[in-house]
Image (cartoon, helix red, strand yellow):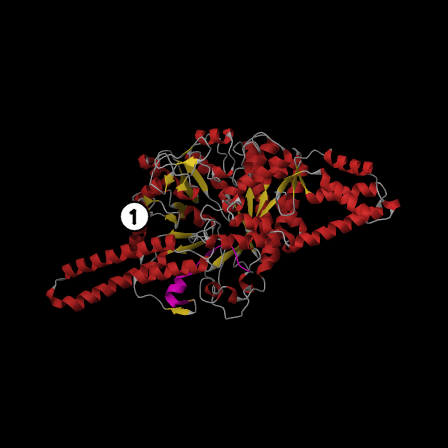
Amino acid sequence: MKVVKRDGKVAAFDRSKIMLAIRKANDAVEEEHRVTEEQIEAVVASIEKIRRARILVEDIQDMVEQKLMEMDKYALAKAYIIYRYTRALVRKANTTDDSILALIRHKNKDVMEENSNKNAVTAATQRDLIAGEVSKDLTRRMLLPEKISKAHDEGAIHFHDADYFLQPIFNCCLINVGDMLDNGTVMNAKLIESPRSFQVACTVMTQIIAAVASSQYGGQSVDISHLGKYLRRSSEKFAKQIEEEAGEAVDEGTKHKLVSARLRDELRSGVQTVQYQINTLMTTNGQSPFVTLFMNLREDDPYIEENAAIIEEILRQRLQGIKNEKGVFVTPAFPKLIYVLDEHNCLKGGPYDYLTKLAVQCSAKRLYPDYISAKKMRGNYEGNVYSCMGCRSFLTPWKDADGNFQFEGRFNQGVVSLNLPQIGILAKGDEKAFWALFEERLELCYEALMCRHNALRGVKSDVSPVHWQYGAIARLEKGEEIDKYLLNGYSTISLGYIGLYEVTKLMKGVSHTTPEGLAFALEIMRRMRAATDKWKEQTTISFGLYGTPAESLCYRFARVDKERFGTIEDVTDKGYYTNSYHVDVREHIDAFSKFTFESQFQRISAGGAISYVEIPNMRHNLEALEDVVRFIYDNIQYAEFNTKSDYCHQCGFDGEILVNDEFEWECPQCHNKDRARMNVTRRTCGYLGENFWNVGKTKEIKDRVLHL
């Protein structure tokens, strides 16, 4: 058996530790209350007979107490309980030494490799990771109710971002960058006035992004349409300058050409500033800001032409890439890009189709942008089109006191995810038992989410002035509490879910792509959505059902369940669970059918949803990509392309990076083996999962990677 300790670590079952604990309790009672060595052996043997692959240490201790009571050794059982309590006090004194020292010595691989965007060797990142270990430890032992911590350790739920729970900060947001640019802001106690040019606006925006990222733990999104007015300001400034310099000596046509030339330089420099600032600025947690640029051309936008030019330049620069230290153009991880498809640019003869064609080229080479269908989104969100947050969760529609919809300046309080396959495993095909346990687990998720919410109550604006006092979220006074932004639907809090495919297989024996499986899967989705709607009505907190894009969680849930329940065909044997509502990667389904099928789940999963399809050999298949983009506009709200895209940041090799004989990723050109210096993604099957080097170094894994 494997024993899960209180800190989540797993160790081999050691019978001697149980025997030692009972002997110590024996020493604390009178002779007549003691048990013999034979009785101690019998207690341990009864636990071993369970033969569970995985067991919590608390469950073992509960069994010991029960056995002692069955022997009528009540005084001894009491002494054992006191011994447990004393040991618990010792544990609460300090439990993080080993994990922190392992970080410093670069041996704590679970933590160091959890986030591929962080270089865990640098001092700045280590400082954040060390703080995270302390936070996780305190969260598990003292801040969360015991049943929530236990449910997390057992893989029933996942309490996201426990490494930041100790701090009074939230998950992700849509920065109100328009307000901050138009009305000014403050950073580091310095006033930043409204910019007078596009270049300065771009610089200020990136400084805002870095400041915001340093005081929250999730992603952020900015709508670049707010930059259009500043590009026009630059145009007007250049026109005035040339008029003053040249006067009547130069004709109007020449003046226009001079203004256009200067404006092109300003546009190029401004967008380059955004790209380079985001990729070179480091937040206080030791990584680049996790930011998304939202590119939406609205027909009623008075600066639509300026914004079209900005979008074009962003796409061109992303298509080119950014140079690494070797001078080789590579694909930057950030900013992530979202491109909105609407009637005027959906490749059906609209005036801005040229931008969409450029976006498709960019997707083919750089995997971004993602695509949002304005047509489908308006139908799902009361006529609105807006960006998801950096974590790909969507806010629910909310109106201010004047009845106007508002999305920017709003945020997500946190996420708890539900392990659906584990419920199916425990139900053993009994639907009545399944739905009863399902409702219990939903209530457990609700309690965990309320822990998230309650941790933010009473927080004062001083905790992050850029968020609460200077416009990113609000403009509160110093010392003012943020509570009014936690209630009445202003911010969201998210229920995530993993493994709809696997739970359907467990309960119905078929995929959720079959008629019988689909009916069951949709019922699960509707019940989860009904639960979030009920919680919102009860609390006024805007709960959202969120198709969690947590790739590493797909592996964690599957690993925990395999250790606990063993190998189950087409469930735990794969090593991962299918993310949210997605079609399993091994099902043969074309891109159009996959989008059509998954779109029905996106409507229910309004708190966050994205769908992926694989387009092989994308760089040489642009016509096929354009066909898919047209299809996206009419059929699905939010979608992304995947393909095989390996890249060595050391030498610029742009091909397929394979596993060497030591089961390590190795660039075939420069033989680089450093994970942090390679961009290895296995997207050929449409699954965007955790990098395979975190799975294990076995022949089976190697064969699977090479096969994919």
Q: What is the span of residues highlighted in magenta in the rendered image?
A: 168-186
Viewer-proximal residue among 32 and 248: 32
Is 162 situated above or below 191? Answer: above
Quadrant of the image containing the N terminus: top right
Crowding near the residue tagged with mark 1, few <14, some 14–19, many ≥20 C-alpha atoms within 10 Å: some
What is the x, y in percent for residue 628? 37, 38
The residue sitting at 43% across, 67% down in the picture is 188
User: Position of 87 compared to 453: left or right?
Assistant: right
User: Position of 66 compared to 640: left or right?
Assistant: right
Viewer-proximal residue among 244 and 161: 161
User: Position of 278 compared to 73: left or right?
Assistant: left
Is 503 situated above or below 540? Answer: above
Q: Is residue 493 visible?
A: no
Q: Is residue 410 visible?
A: yes
SS of the residue at dot 1? helix
User: Position of 213 compared to 457: left or right?
Assistant: left
The residue sitting at 52% across, 42% down in the picture is 552
The residue sitting at 28% across, 48% down in the picture is 351
Residue indicated by mark 1: 316
What is the x, y in percent for residue 410? 48, 58
What is the x, y in percent for residue 163? 55, 52
Quarter-of-image position of residue 156: top right
Question: Residue 184: within the magenta?
Answer: yes
What is the x, y in percent for residue 623? 31, 36
Viewer-proximal residue among 187 and 262: 187
Quadrant of the image containing the C terminus: top left
Question: Residue 646: within the magenta?
Answer: no
As drawn, the residue found furthest toward the left would be: 249
**Residue type marked 1:** Arg
